[in-house]
Image (cartoon, helix red, strand yellow):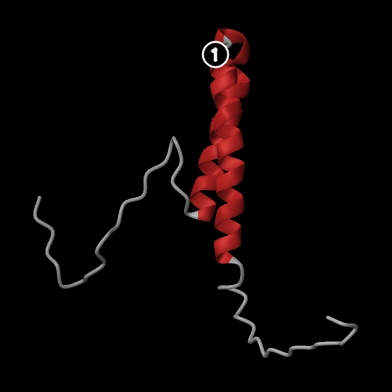
Amino acid sequence: LNEEVHTQTSKVESLGVEYENLGLRRLAAKAQLLELVDMYSSLEGRGEEGKKEAEEVRQQIVDISVNANVIARFTTFVGVEQDPQLELCL
């Protein structure tokens, strides 16, 4: 503004490696999953000729979903109570 120089300084603390960019990682996984699901749908529509490729894409979808903890077309996540005091009755 009117050839004046303005500066601003902020202190930002870095997170530990295990927490760094988890949100970004999950967003990237979701974007990749959307593309793979579209690809799977188009291959599935080709009948027998696209069946093998569709299975490979399906496995990629499952792998990415599980590794990134993002639900996809072929995955479901279940919460499990880990209480050693609980009895299991069958």
- Report the front residue among 78 and 88: 78
Q: Is residue 33 above or below residue 25?
A: above
On screen, residue 18 versus residue 7, left or right, reads left
Q: Quadrant of the N terminus?
A: bottom right
* Residue 18 on image: x %, y %: 57, 73
* Residue 43 on image: x %, y %: 59, 19
Q: Residue at x 61, y 15 (%)?
A: 50
* Residue 34 on image: x %, y %: 56, 38
Q: Residues within 10 Å of mark 1 (few under 14, many from 20)?
A: few
Q: Which residue is mark 1?
A: 45
Q: Is residue 33 above or below residue 90?
A: above
Occupied quadrant, residue 40: top right
Amino acid carrying mark 1 in the image: Gly
Q: Residue furthest left?
A: 89
Q: Residue at x 56, y 73 (%)?
A: 19
- Report the front residue among 10 and 67: 10
- Report the front residue among 65 and 82: 65
Q: Residue furthest front?
A: 2
Tell me the element at label 1: loop
